[in-house]
Every structure is written in C-alpha cells, then in structure tokens.
Image (cartoon, rainbow, N blue to C red):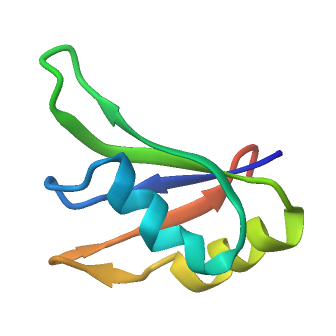
Amino acid sequence: TYTAQVRYLPERFQDINLQRLFAQFGSVVSASVELDSKNRPTGEGKVIFKDLFCCQTAVKFMDKFYIDGQRLQVFMDGE
C-alpha cells in the first residue's frame, strides 16, 4: 500500500470526506483524519491507496488544492 499524507484539512473534515475527496484517483484502502486528545480534528490525515500510480497522481493533483478556505499540502509518506 501507498500513503498520501494530507495537511491543512478544513476543520469540518471527517474520514468519509477525505475518502470521497481522494477516491477519484483510484482504490482507497482507507482514509483517516487525525484527532487530538479531545477528539477534535487536527487538520491532518492520511489516505492509503492500493496502487502507487494512484497515490502519485493524487499527490500531484491535490497538493495545493484549495478547499473551504484551506490550501492542502499533500505528499507521499516518506517524502
């Protein structure tokens, strides 16, 4: 599997929103938004893809993508 790390997510984003946003690039194994100790979103998350090409394509198109007043930062795990 291949992981895309996502930063600067809008506050309202939940796992399902993240999954739907990235599903257009291929088979998403899982998508999760990180939560703090009070169970509030931290603005960071990760999307795990089955295929390397799908993950690379998602990073290419979603890095700097503007959504709900936020400009996302997206990169492959390990970059």
Q: In this rendering, is residue 28 above or below 63?
A: above
Vertical comparison of 71 with 45: above or below: below
| Left or right relative to 45: residue 46 | right
Residue that appears at 86% across and 61% down: 51
- State left or right for residue 37 relative to residue 6: left
Q: Position of residue 68 (x, y in %)?
A: 17, 77
Residue 58: x %, y % from top left: 65, 74
- Quarter of the image where one finds residue 55: bottom right
Report the side of 58 relative to 18 (left or right).
Answer: right
> In the rendered view, would you say 57 is above or below 40?
below
For the residue pair 76 and 12, the one nearer the viewer reads as 12
Number of numbered discs on residues = 0
Residue at image point 39% right, 69% down: 72
Quadrant for the N terminus in the image:
top right
Q: Is residue 11 left or right of residue 6?
A: left
Residue drawn at (12%, 17%) of the image: 38
Q: Residue furthest right?
A: 52
In-front residue for pair 64/56:
56
- In the rendered image, which quarter is residue 4 located in? bottom right
Give residue 18's position: percent from left, percent from top: 41, 59
- Give x and y (percent) for residue 71: 32, 75
